[in-house]
Each structure stands twice: as structure tokens, then as C-alpha cells.
Image: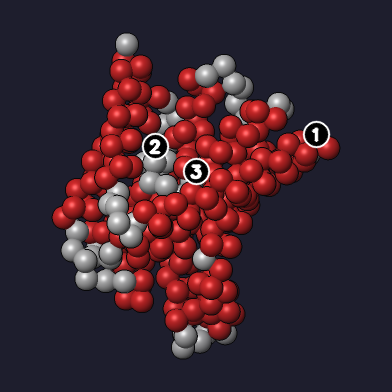
Amino acid sequence: MALTHLLILALIQGITEFLPISSSGHLILLPQLTALTDQGQALDVAVHVGTLGAVILFFWTDVRGVAAGLGRLVQGRLDTQGAFWALCLLVATVPVVLLGLALKLTGFGDLLRSTAVIGWTMLIFGILLYWADQTGPVVKQTSNWTLKDAVIMGLWQALALIPGTSRSGIVITAGRQLGYDRESAARLAMLMSIPTILASGTLLSVEVAQEANTALFRDAAIAAVFAFLAALAALKLMFALLKSVSFTPYVIYRVLLGVILLVIAYT
């Protein structure tokens, strides 16, 4: 695959994976609205690995605590914050895994990959994010995360399997309505992305394992590196902006893109 195509793919995935504007929606639109060919599942896995590396590095302190806590959780011990967060992350991941398997086994997920669906989800969930951000109370931080909130946020996260919804966006929406401040809602959304990306990446890896060849490995490595760098930059930018800016700029982008896509879909 051409280096330019790999760069575009990696930048789209890296930038949109953690911003509340939907990476899956943008990746689906790329071949639909341009002359570029579909990148295929192997490269999807590669760019997801890149973004996974970025979020682990960015939240390394939290990730290290959760990893240590996971070992204690396996031993039946829930005596540290890391162990409790590990439990919350596992519980929050269950709904998206179960719904993802259901969509894949039924083939219904393929029916959702259309310009019209992405247009509507961009618009509807963008407005929902604005409403939650403007009306949600600010009474909680990440240290206040509860198992109940993890279940609720996990159920909302499952909606992100509809292209255009945005996994980070819908979890942030849920977090703001539950009373978490903007930075805490975004932080929890990013941490919840780790087991979710691991689960989806593992599933895709199994499917593309037989396709492996030297050229594909080379393209995958290049795409992963670019996606890692783009995702790391996007994370730094978003958390820097959250100190002084709301989620409104992302909402404006979503609404404008949604309207454009709907015009394209219905004309």
C-alpha cells in the first residue's frame, strides 16, 4: 500500500480514536467518499495497536496500578484502588464484547456501515454530548468511580458499536451525566478504551492471521507507528484543552459533518 495511504489511515485513526468524533465512522467514510481502497482488517488491527500503545503510555501510572491490581483481583483481593479499578474496567467491558459478538455472528453490524447511519449518529450523539456536558453536574472525580457507574458507562459504551457514535464520546457523555468533571469523564473513557481495544484487536487478529505476509507486516508496522504518534498528540491536545475549553468544538464538528453526510446520503 502507498505510504500516503498508510499515513492518512494512521492519522485518521490516531486522531479520532480518543477525540469524541468517532474513529470507526471516519475509517468507514474514507473509502466511501474518496478514491482510496478499503484498508482491510489487517491494517485496522495495526492502527488499533498503535492507538493502544499511545493510551497506555499517556496513562502509564494508572495502567501500572490497574495491572498490579489485576493480579490481586485474580487472587480474590479487592484491597487497593488498582484492584477495584481493574474490576470496574472488566465489568464495563462486558456489554461491548457481548454486543460486538452478537453483531458479528448475525452479520447485522455490516448493515450499519453506511453514510446515512454515520450521518445520523454523528448528529444525534453530538447533540447528546453537548446536552450532557452543559447540564451534567460536577460532583465527582475519577477517585469517586463506583462499580455502579462502571456498569452504566459500560452499557453506554456498547452503543459505540454503531458507526459514528464514538466510543470516547458516548462514555464521556455518560460520565458527564453521572456527575464527573470533564477531565475525569475523559480520563475514565480513555482507561475504558484499553480493554475494549484489546478485545476487538484480539478478535480481528485471529481473523487476519492467515493473511500474514512480508508486505503486509511492513505496512502494518508503518501504520501502527504513525497511529501511535497521532494518538499521543491527540491525547495531549485534548487534555490540555479540557482545562479551559468544553466539548463544544467537537460537537460543532460532529453536527456539521453529520449534516453534510445526510445531504450526501439522501441526494
Q: Quadrant of the N terminus?
A: top right
Query: Which percent across, then down, holds residue 108?
Result: 45, 34
The three-letter code of the residue at mark 1 reads Ala
- Judge left or right: residue 42 versus residue 54: right
Q: Residues within 10 Å of mark 2 (few under 14, many from 20)?
A: many
Residue 81 seen in this snapshot: yes
CB contact under 8 Å: marks 1 and 2: no
- Measuring 53% from the left and 77% from the top, which residue is drawn there? 65
Q: Which mark is residue 166?
A: none
Residue annotated with mark 1: 215
- Measuring 48% from the left and 67% from the top, which residue is drawn there? 90
Earlier in the chain: of badge 2 and badge 3, it is: 3
Between marks 1 and 3 in the image, the one whose residue lies nearer the viewer: 3
- What is the residue that sits farthest to the right in this orientation? 214
- Secondary structure found at label 1: helix
Query: Along the line of sight, which residue is nearer the eye, 71 or 106?
Result: 71
The three-letter code of the residue at mark 3 reads Ile
Query: Which percent across, then down, holds residue 234?
Result: 48, 49
Earlier in the chain: of badge 1 and badge 3, it is: 3
- Secondary structure found at label 3: helix
The three-letter code of the residue at mark 2 reads Gly
Residue annotated with mark 3: 15
- What is the residue that sits farthest to the left in this orientation? 135
